[in-house]
Image (spheres, rainbow, N blue to C red):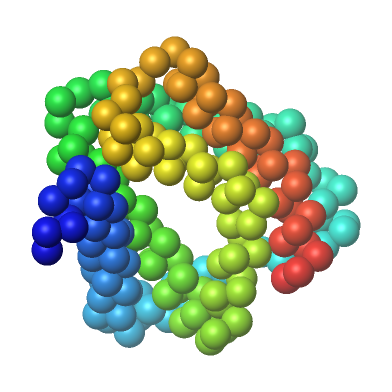
């Protein structure tokens, strides 16, 4: 236990615990639902994109919709990072991330079995390359370094989120159409 006394290891352990706890709670939540709700979730499937559907998508509108969801999330994370409650709220945000990921993976696996895990990976693929570093910088690296949120770091994280939203809007539909 001595090695978990320093701030870096304690933070990693705490975030891992809350992420895992959220995933367990999300899995239990979905598996303990009544049969009717589970049947409804089995049929809530991501629509498979074909080339014909891709031609009808307004990618600019999709980008604006994705960005309108990501910007408030980012601003909320910035506000949390600037408060003294950040050490308590960031682990809860990690639990929420674990919960929502587990619910999505469980819903997909309830529908198509183990192939649901592959579907989940395809659904998050290119944008995760930008969102994961942004989350890492804000939730782990900055608290480990005891760095305050400065304009330069806030802009770097915002650029990552902007790039992630662009990739999610313009590239992810093509990836989904190609692999699913």
Q: Position of residue 110 (x, y in %)?
A: 47, 82
67 in relation to 150, above or below: below
143 in relation to 124, above or below: above
Q: How many marks on residues?
A: 0
Locate residue 50: give its quadrant: bottom right
Q: Where is the N terminus found, in terms of image quarters?
A: bottom left
Q: Nearer the viewer, residue 21 or 14?
A: 14
Q: Residue furthest top?
A: 151
State left or right for residue 39 relative to residue 53. Answer: left
Locate residue 124: give its quadrant: bottom right
Q: Position of residue 67 (x, y in %)?
A: 57, 31
Q: Is residue 92 visible?
A: no
Q: Position of residue 111 (x, y in %)?
A: 52, 81
Locate residue 179: give its quadrant: bottom right
- Which residue is found at the position 24% from the left and 57% from the top? 13
Q: Residue furthest front?
A: 2
Q: Where is the C terminus found, in terms of image quarters?
A: bottom right
99 in relation to 65, above or below: below
- Which residue is found at the position 43% from the left and 37% from the top? 137
Q: Nearer the viewer, residue 84 or 36?
A: 84
State left or right for residue 10 relative to residue 172. Answer: left
- Which residue is found at the position 87% from the left and 48% from the top? 55
- Which residue is found at the position 46% from the left and 71% from the top? 105
Q: Nearer the viewer, residue 141 or 134?
A: 141
Q: Is residue 105 visible?
A: yes
Q: Position of residue 60 (x, y in %)?
A: 74, 31
């Amino acid at each position: 236990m001595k090695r978990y006394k320093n701030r870096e290891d304690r933070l990693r352990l705490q975030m891992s615990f809350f992420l895992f706890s959220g995933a367990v709670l999300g899995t239990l939540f979905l598996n303990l639902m009544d049969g009717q709700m589970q049947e409804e979730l089995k049929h809530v499937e991501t629509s498979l994109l074909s080339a014909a559907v891709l031609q009808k998508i307004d990618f600019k509108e999709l980008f604006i919709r994705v960005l309108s969801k990501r910007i408030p999330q980012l601003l909320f994370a910035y506000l949390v990072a600037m408060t003294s409650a950040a050490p308590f709220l960031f682990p809860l945000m990690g639990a929420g991330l674990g919960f929502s990921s587990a619910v999505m993976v469980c819903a997909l696996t309830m529908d198509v079995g183990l192939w649901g895990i592959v579907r989940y990976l395809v659904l998050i693929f290119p944008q995760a390359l930008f969102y994961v570093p942004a989350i890492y910088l804000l939730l782990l690296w900055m608290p480990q370094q005891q760095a305050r949120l400065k304009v330069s770091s806030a802009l770097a994280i915002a650029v990552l989120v902007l790039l992630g939203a662009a990739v999610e809007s313009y590239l992810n539909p093509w990836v989904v159409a190609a692999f699913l």
